[in-house]
Each structure stands twice: as structure tokens, then as C-alpha cells.
Amino acid sequence: APGPCPGEAFVIPVTVYPGIQVPNQSGSVCSGENFTLNLVDNPPEVILPDGVTFTWSAADSPNVTNEQPGTAESVFSQTLFLDEDVFAQTVQFDVDVVAGAGCEGASFAVELFVHDLDPGLIQGAQSLCVGEEPQPISFSANPIGGGSVTQQWQFFDPVQGSWIDILGATSLSYLPPSDLTETTLFRAEVRSTAGGSSCPKTTNEIEVEIRN
């Protein structure tokens, strides 16, 4: 009886997607700034094959607007805004990550600390003769922030056309030098810092006039 006819060999490619593993994530971001979660494959803590997609939802958090859901996105990204006179709020997102070919994915949470600040108001404008001892410039309304608040006093350099930090001037008041020979503008740059994010804002400007 005739036997089977041999055919040509052929190759069937098989793509194997590794199991996904992503621990819960956290971060901090300034109100109104973009936050993007940069995840990379780093076994055994993070197992993330190429081509994964992220789908997420957010619980409706008080005092925060612009929480955006995402479907099959390549990265997790948000730009959140705090309500007026609110300086800190935590927002949680539930994220599903899926590999190709309909393989089983994984879920993790992203907790974002959103912060902002009010830089406050400064006072102490004055008019002096050359060599006259100046009075301190200080905050009439202290800064308020959702993170750790710091301040840095600055003066305006008309030659460079920019604001210059004054070395060591980081308290809530600043005493201008007595050797000023020309009218100078001062202000404070205030920052709210939390985690890896720092939110800078500046106060109003104060003039120390020097009369020649």
C-alpha cells in the first residue's frame, strides 16, 4: 500500500509574553503640572514586557479636578488641579496593565500627592539716603503650602536683566545691606516641596529707593 508523502518542514513562530508584575506606585506633583509614571522592566520587582498597555480609573477625590480615565494607553499620565485655597490632596488611581495576545495582566494602585502654595505677601518698601541704615523686609502674610515650605530672597539685577538669589537669605525676613548705592527691587521665591516635586512661586516685589 502506498505510504504518506513527506512534506517540507516549516516553522511556527510562538511569542511568549512573561507574566506581569507591578507593585503599587506613589508620587507627588504640583497642582497644574503633568505627572507621568515612568515604569521600566526591572525583575524581580517589576516585570513589564514590551508592548503593554495601561487602563485606569480614579476615585472622585474632593478638592481635585481634571482626573482623567485612560484606556489602553502606553503610559500613565495625569494633570491635576487643586481647588482654590486647597494646598494638598491625595488621589488614588486603580490601574490595569495588559500584555499582548490577550494574556492575563496585573493590577496596581497609583497614589498621587498633589500640592500647591500661596507665596504670601511681603512689606517693607522704603526710601533712603545713600549710607542710611535700611529696615527689614518681611512677610505681612506668611506663605502656606501643602509640602515643606521654604523661601529664598532675591534682588533684581538690571545689568543681567534677571533675579538673583541672595546667599543665605532664607528666613521670613531680610535686612538689605547698608551699602546700597542705587534703587533695588527685592522679592522672595517660595517653594512647596514634597517627594520629588517642588512648586515655586514668587511674592510681590518691594522697592528700596536710594536717593542721591
Image: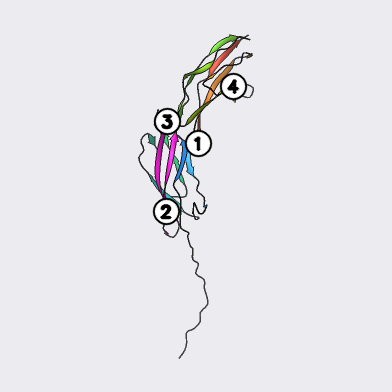
What is the distance, in whole Å, between disc 4 and disc 3 at their CAs?
A: 29 Å
Q: Nearer the viewer, residue 146 or 32?
A: 146
Which numbered disc, 3 or 1, marks the residue that appears first in the sequence?
Answer: 3
What is the distance, in whole Å, between disc 3 and disc 2 at their CAs?
A: 33 Å
Residue 206 image offset from top left, x and y in percent: 53, 17
* Mark in front: 4 vs 1: 1
Q: Can residue 27 be seen by looking at this rendering?
A: yes
Which numbered disc, 2 or 1, marks the residue that appears first in the sequence?
Answer: 2
Q: Which residue is mark 2?
A: 106
- Label 3's element? loop
Q: Which residue is mark 1?
A: 197
Which numbered disc, 3 or 2, marks the residue that appears first in the sequence?
Answer: 3
**Residue that appears at 40% across and 39% down:** 91
Categorize mark 4 by other alpha carbons within 10 Å: few (<14), some (14-19), many (20+): some
- Label 2's element? strand
Instruction: Name the kind of residue labelled 2 in the image.
Output: Ala
* Mark in front: 4 vs 2: 2
What is the distance, in whole Å, between disc 3 and disc 1 at their CAs?
A: 14 Å
Q: Which residues are magenta?
A: 88-116
Q: Which residue is mark 3?
A: 87
- Left or right of 97? Residue 60 is left
Q: Which residue is mark 4?
A: 156
